[in-house]
Image (cartoon, rainbow, N blue to C red):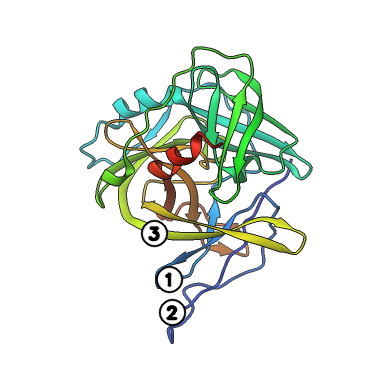
Amino acid sequence: MTTEDFPAVSGSIEERPPLWRRTGVIATSAALVAAVVGGVTGGVVGAMNASPAAVAPVSGQVASNASSTVDVSGVAARVLPSVVQVNVASGQGQGLGSGVVLTSDGRILTNNHVVAGAQRVTVTLSDGRTVDATVVGADASSDLAVVQAEGVTGLTPATFGDSDRVKIGDEVVAIGSPEGLQGTVTSGIVSALDRTVTVPGTSTGRRASSVSYQAIQTDASINPGNSGGPLVDAAGEVVGINSAIYSPASDSGQAGSVGIGFAIPSNQVRQLIDQL
């Protein structure tokens, strides 16, 4: 089992001092680094955890905003059965991310960077069962993948909403397995829309193609392990797939959530699901 640190990217704005310093850290191939375009360049990392913990079945650990007008507990109760933990074993160790149930027979959506290079994939369902799974489709250019859980029926598919209707200031809820804590629920708002996020793709030799998408930015707490999990609106409909966070690095390691997370809009996702 390995512990994954994420590399940082330095940046500056014209004559201004650097936004933050880059320090030496160690990264594995599962790490995802991105630059946020639009006047600011900074480090963004795929929210995937390389040190999964053994976690018992949970009904959800809710960390909601006290001033929220959204019934976070109600949203959590509706969506948690549709969220799984994706466990990955590769030649570089073990990792985990999150996933969203697409069909009752076990089709599950996650991020490509969660399963890239996987030698074995399992999924832990909301009821605590862990079953084998197979990657049936992956698209590095969109950072999306679909896995098939084996031998399951009766799962609860998530409902996808219209991300074009999302507005800045809308309250949203993120669900996933940050640091292996399955069923964790956090809430916040949409803090920006159409944020261009560019991330290096999977390396081939010395070259790596970049991946860009227009992301929903949120201050709902997203941490390593949330990748592939849903960002949902007040109605419990998926409006984004959590995929990356801005996370300053230091000599002591990568920082966690600083209130800047990114999700792939659901309308982009729906266009690609059938192809995957």
Query: Going 70% across and 59% down the picture, which residue do you hit?
Result: 26
Considering only order in the chain, which callout, 3 or 1, is on the residue closer to the N terminus? 1
| Residue 25 versus residue 114 in the image, above or below | below
- Can you tell which quarter of the image residue 139 is in? top right
Image position, residue 27 (x, y; %) = 68, 56
Image position, residue 11 (x, y; %) = 51, 74
User: Which residue in the structure is indicated by mark 3?
Assistant: 195
Query: Going 63% across and 53% down the picture, which residue do you hit?
Result: 31
Query: Going 26% across and 40% down the picture, which residue do you hit?
Result: 66
Using the rendered image of the protein, determine whether residue 59 is visible from the camera's viewpoint: no
Near mark 1 (Cα within 10 A), the count class, few <14, some 14-19 or many ≥20, is: few
Tag 1 near tag 2, CB within 8 Å: yes
Look at discs 1 and 3 and give the one toward the viewer.
3
Relative to residue 160, is residue 48 drawn left or right? right
Under circle 3, the secondary element is strand
Q: The residue under label 1 is which amino acid type?
A: Val
In-front residue for pair 143/39: 143
Q: Distance of mark 2 from mark 3, alpha carbons?
A: 17 Å
Look at discs 2 and 3 and give the one toward the viewer.
3
User: Which residue in the structure is indicated by mark 1?
Assistant: 40
Identify the image quadrant of the C terminus.
Answer: top right
The label shown at residue 103 is none
Using the rendered image of the protein, determine whether residue 168 is visible from the camera's viewpoint: yes
| Residue 107 versus residue 274 in the image, above or below | above
Query: Going 43% across and 47% down the picture, which residue do you hit?
Result: 263
